[in-house]
Amino acid sequence: DTGVSQDPRHKITKRGQNVTFRCDPISEHNRLYWYRQTLGQGPEFLTYFQNEAQLEKSRLLSDRFSAERPKGSFSTLEIQRTEQGDSAMYLCASSHRQGRDEQFFGPGTRLTVL
Amino acid sequence: AQSVAQPEDQVNVAEGNPLTVKCTYSVSGNPYLFWYVQYPNRGLQFLLKYITGDNLVKGSYGFEAEFNKSQTSFHLKKPSALVSDSALYFCAVRDRGDYKLSFGAGTTVTVRA
C-alpha cells in the first residue's frame, strides 16, 4: 500500500497522560499536514511541514501540542497532559511539491481521553 | 481568511436519481476547490478539484462539480446516484497563496434503493 499511513489507529488514554501519533506520508511527497476532526465537523488545520521545516501552526495548536518531521519523511504529533477536549480524530495528509496538488489523507488516529 | 459553507446537513435521494451536494466558499484571492468523501472509520478520499480553466470538473466515480465564480459556489453533482454513494461529503477551499485547506462541516448523503 503506497498511501498515507498512521499509527496507531485508535488510542485511549487517561487525562493527564502524554500520547504520540505517527504519520508516514506518500514517499515522494515533500509536504505534510496535520488536521483534527471532531464529531459533526470538518477537519481543522493544525500544522504544516515542507520537508523537515514546520512552516505554519494553527492557533488551535496549544503549547501542549508539538509536531516534528525530523528527516523530512515521517512525522510525529505529541500531545502532553491530555485533556478530555483533545478527544478527536487526528488526520495526516501529504501532497507533492506542486502547489496545485491535492492532499492525500491517511485513515486517522482516533484519540479518546477518559 | 478562507471558509466553506455546506448548507445541507443531509441529502436523501433515490437510487438512479440525480444527486447534488451544495458548497459555497469565501477566499480573499483566487480559490483552489476540492471535494472529498469519507466513509465510516476511513480517512478522506479525494474526488475532484478545480484549479483553473473549464468550470465543469469531472472526477472519480462519475462525480462532477461546477465552479461558479459569481456565486462563489462549487456544487458536487452526479447524474445517477448509487446506493454505494452513501457517505459523508466535504467541500474544501484554499487560497492559491496558501497550503492549508479549510473544510465545510460536511453533508451526509443517503441513497435509498
Image: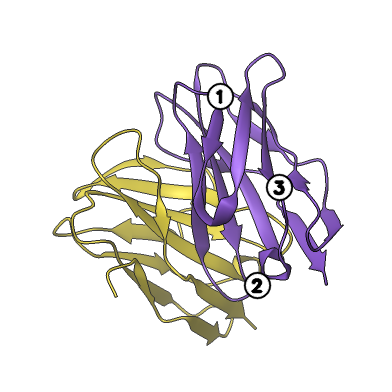
Chain colours: A yellow, B purple
State the CA–CA distance, disc 1 to disc 2.
44 Å
Residue on which disc 3 sits: B79
State the CA–CA distance, disc 2 to disc 3.
43 Å
Chain of the residue that carries numbered disc 1 in the rendered image: B
Toward which corner of the image does residue B84 lie, by quadrant? bottom right
Badge 1 crowding class, 10 Å Cα cut-off, few under 14, some 14 to 19, many 20 or more, is some
Tell me whether marks 1 and 2 sit on the same chain.
no
Question: In the rendered view of the protein, which quadrant contains the N terminus of chain A?
Answer: bottom left
Badge 2 crowding class, 10 Å Cα cut-off, few under 14, some 14 to 19, many 20 or more, is some
Residue A55 at x, y percent in the picture: 30, 39
Tell me whether marks 2 and 3 sit on the same chain.
no
Q: What is the residue that sits farthest to the top in this orientation?
A: B70
Q: Is residue A101 left or right of residue B54?
A: left
| Residue plotted at (58% across, 52% down) | B62
Inspect the image, locate mark 2, and give the three-letter code of the amino acid beneath it: Gln
Residue on which disc 2 sits: A84
Chain of the residue that carries numbered disc 3 in the rendered image: B
State the CA–CA distance, disc 3 to disc 1.
17 Å
Residue on which disc 1 sits: B55
Inspect the image, locate mark 1, and give the three-letter code of the amino acid beneath it: Asn
User: In the rendered image of this protein, does residue A85 appear above or below residue B52?
Assistant: below
Asked whether the beta carbons under mark 2 and mark 3 sit within 8 Å of each other, the answer is no
Q: Secondary structure at mark 2?
A: helix
User: In the rendered image of this protein, does residue A29 appear above or below residue B29?
Assistant: below
Q: Secondary structure at mark 1?
A: loop
Viewer-nearest residue: B14 or A9: B14
Q: Is residue B87 left or right of residue A12?
A: right
Q: Is residue B109 left or right of residue B50?
A: right
Inspect the image, locate mark 3, and give the three-letter code of the amino acid beneath it: Pro
Viewer-nearest residue: A62 or B4: B4
Residue A2 at x, y percent in the picture: 27, 69
| Residue plotted at (19% across, 50% down) | A52
